[in-house]
Image (spheres, rainbow, N blue to C red):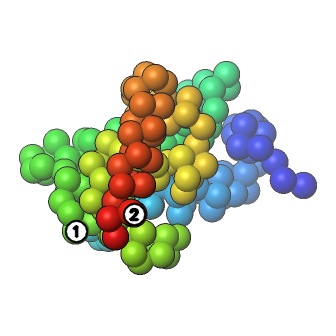
Amino acid sequence: MNLTDEQLVAGYLAGDEMALEILIKRYLRPIYSFTFRFVGDSQETEDITQEVFVKVWRNLKKFDKNKKFKTWIFTIAKNTCLDWQKKKKTLPLFFAETIRDPSPILNEPLDRILERLSPKYRMVLFLRYNDHFTFREIAESLGESIDTIKTRHRRGIAILKKLLKAK
């Protein structure tokens, strides 16, 4: 039986240690990919991803059961990345044109074209099509309004189409 994230959280809080392990396995790759988009360095990404899961473990008792776990964990990941950037006191690497996703989800030519998008568009498209987030989940995770996310999605797609035609 495939349990929902919320059922797994409830199971873990009731004492089922295996439930947390399932949640970690379910979200390890998506959180790693999301984090890599922010920092662009595999070693830093591994450290930040580990920190995200430690925060999840420590704060699972505070999880609001009226919200989606997926949104909650990606919000923790985003905030952990932002904290890392503040500590580093440098411009985030996702502004660089050389960022590459370590996962082979996208083929090489499309990946290079996506890198040419502004980070605000790239993140929305990545969350929408790679991690299958709804617009509401993206808005909650990035701390933006749903209208802003829909606009970024529409503009990102338009820019992507132009880039593909120019290819």
Q: Nearer the viewer, mark 1 or mark 2?
A: 2
Q: CA distance from mark 1 to mark 2?
A: 18 Å
Q: Would residue 151 appear left or right of 10 to someone viewing this image? A: left
Q: Position of residue 164 (x, y in %)?
A: 39, 63
Residue at label 1? 98
Q: Residue at the spot x=27%, y=42% of the render? A: 82
Residue at label 2? 164
Residue 27 image-quadrant placement? bottom right
Please tell me whether residue 90 is drawn above or below residue 96 in the rendered image.
above
Tell me the quadrant of the picture where the C terminus can be found: bottom left
Q: Position of residue 92 (x, y in %)?
A: 19, 51
Q: Residue at the spot x=48%, y=42% of the render? A: 74
Please tell me whether residue 56 is drawn above or below residue 29 in the rendered image.
above
Q: Residue at the spot x=27%, y=59% of the render? A: 116
Query: How many numbered callouts?
Result: 2
The answer to whether residue 37 is visible is no
Which callout, 1 or 2, points at the residue further toward the start of the chain? 1
- The residue under label 2 is which amino acid type? Leu
Q: Secondary structure at mark 1?
A: loop
Mark 1 nearby-residue class (10 Å; few <14, some 14–19, many ≥20): few
**2 or 13: which is nearer to us?**
2
Q: Position of residue 154 (x, y in %)?
A: 45, 38
Q: Would residue 144 appear left or right of 44 to someone viewing this image? A: right
Please tell me whether residue 41 is drawn above or below residue 14 in the rendered image.
below
Q: Position of residue 18 (x, y in %)?
A: 73, 56
Badge 1 vs badge 2, beta-carbon distance below 8 Å: no
Mark 2 nearby-residue class (10 Å; few <14, some 14–19, many ≥20): few
